[in-house]
Amino acid sequence: MIDKDIFRQMALSFPNAVELPHFEKTSFRINKKIFATLDERNNSAVVKLSPLDQSVFCTFDKTVMYPVNGTRGRQGWTVIELDNVKKGMLRDALKTAYQDVKTKKTWENRIMKSETPKHNNVEEYYSSMPTQAKIKLYEMREIIKSVVPLAEEVISYGMPAFKQNGILVYFAGYKNHIGFYPTSSGIKTFKNEFADYKWSKGAVQFPIDEPLPKMLIKRVVKFRAKEDKEKTTLKKVMRNNKNSKAENYVKYHNDGSIWAKGKVINNVPEGYWEWFRKGGTIMRSGYFSKGKQVGEWTTYDNKGKVFKVTVIK
């Protein structure tokens, strides 16, 4: 649990951040612009993120971080439930909000407004790219399509993206690299295999003058397609069990590190689950349906790389 004093300390730890009243709440500002507010009565906060950053943070757990209702939510204003958020995630969200508001030029705005013109469809986007980037983008497109041939190609946040039920992955062309954005879960799951590339919690860069890692990209897209399907299935289960509530479940090793995490409905495992070794390396992952193992179950080696995939019917 994060209390008001811890939140205030974290928000004011950034250079030149100031605290001012804001109606019934407390605001935290940089250059007179609000990057976060604190609601002490409900022990919750709101941060100003770009819509893309918002989508990244909210993929972790939408009961902990979720968009504000209405237009403000679509603009990136994001609620954080301080009773449940982890300190590290809160710090990352505050830092992202602070930096975006301070520079007045978010990553999304750079793409959509100043550095890249708006495009009505993917073909316009590809056509606008320099030859070398265009070749790589078409190659990336074919790699993704080979895994999810029925997914819809769309422009989202000014970039090409593939959509199933939700967006699976984004990608974009630059002078020196191809940006690949498989959301934070895709990066987190395959971070060990991205070690040879420049990457962050939501993106990885593939150098323009090097071959694309086709098999790695395919595996990431396959993972995101499974994750997207699992989320959709869970929503259907919830609709069919209106009186039931999906709850997060976490079990720990003796040293306090996470051993297993997933969701339960009426104390029965449901959806995607993960198990970890001491030290945090993923050990196994797979899906449950009404407490029974279903679909693909993946076993990982000591370094977190895929060792074996088993299909359970």
Image: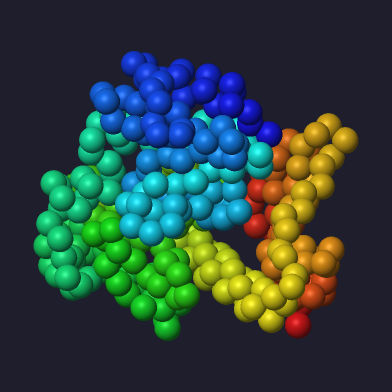
Rendered residue at 66%/39% (across/down): 83
Q: Is residue 125 above or below residue 205?
A: below
- Nearest the camera: 119 or 204? 119
Q: Is residue 160 above or below residue 25?
A: below
Q: Is residue 230 left or right of residue 217?
A: right
Rendered residue at 70%/40% (across/down): 280
- Based on the displayed image, in which of its 4 quarters is residue 290 positioned? bottom right
Q: Is residue 14 left or right of residue 293?
A: left
Which quadrant is the N terminus positioned in? top right
Q: Position of residue 143 (x, y in %)?
A: 39, 70
- Nearest the camera: 104 or 225? 104
Which quadrant is the C terminus positioned in? bottom right
Q: Is residue 52 above or below residue 253?
A: below
- Nearest the camera: 236 or 304? 236
Rendered residue at 50%/52% (across/down): 66
- Based on the displayed image, in which of its 4 quarters is residue 103 positioned? top left
Rendered residue at 38%/70% (across/down): 162
Scheme of colours in the image? rainbow
Q: Position of residue 187 (x, y in %)?
A: 50, 50
Q: Position of residue 235 (x, y in %)?
A: 61, 73
Q: Is residue 234 visible?
A: yes
> Number of marks in the image?
0
Q: Is residue 113 left or right of residue 227?
A: left
Q: Position of residue 92 (x, y in %)?
A: 49, 34
Which residue is farthest front?
24
Q: Is residue 213 visible?
A: no
